[in-house]
Image (tube, helix red, strand yellow):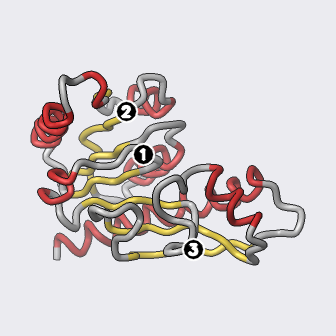
Amino acid sequence: MKKIVVFASGSGTNFQAIIDTVVQKSIHAEITGLITDNPDAAAIKRAQKNGIPFRVLRSADYNDYQAYTFGLLNQLNEWKPDLIVLAGYLKKIPVEVIRLYENRIINIHPALLPKYGGKGFYGMNVHRAVIAAGEKESGCTVHIVTEEYDKGPILAQMKVPVKKDDRPETLQQRILKQEHRLLPQVINKLLTQKQS
């Protein structure tokens, strides 16, 4: 069975969407672990509730960045992922990890890349920028993770309209619903391709 490792920093609603899809057997895989940089992440509770191992890995807890990278690689080696999924993970992935798992790390971004991507564009920052620019539509993007923030090849997108009375919070909720649909679809497609 294919193995997925999820990275999440916050509430973990996309993580939950993956868990639900695995439980429903719509994705034929197992989630072998969760990595978070936030000891207070609600994603941890979701992992515990579903019997998924988790590790809190923060660069601040290591002597240097190299030691942190080594710790991350060690943990991934233990969990042996076929696919790594960044689901609301706010830290940059070390280059060594990206190179070792080339084309096997995907990220979900709450905008239609290449617009509103890159450093500083995460969470509400994205939705505020979209509304401030007067965009007529926004959405979410799943892409391959490369060494540059949000620059990897785009795998799939879903669009939503930006309404005249939208606030960042209302736009976020509408996009999040699509994220919960899109991310499991892309994971399933990638893992099915890898089996064939």
Residue drawn at (39%, 26%) of the image? 48
Of the residues under marks 1 and 2, which one precedes in the sequence?
Answer: 2
* Residue linked to disc 3: 158
Q: CA distance from mark 1 to mark 2?
A: 8 Å
Q: Residues within 10 Å of mark 2 (few under 14, many from 20)?
A: some
Residue type highlighted by circle 3: Met
Q: Is residue 57 in view?
A: no
- Judging from the image, what secondary structure is the residue with disc 1 in? loop
Give x and y (percent) for residue 194.
19, 71
Of the 4 image quadrants, the one containing the C terminus is: bottom left
Of the residues under marks 3 and 1, which one precedes in the sequence?
Answer: 1
Q: Is residue 3 above or below residue 37?
A: below
* Residue linked to disc 1: 89
Q: Nearer the viewer, mark 2 or mark 3?
A: 2
Q: Is residue 49 above or below residue 109?
A: above
Q: CA distance from mark 3 to mark 1?
A: 20 Å
Are the residues at dot 1 and dot 2 in contact (C-beta closer than 8 Å)? yes
Does 165 sit left or right of 194 as displayed? right
Of 158 and 191, which appears nearest the observer?
Answer: 158
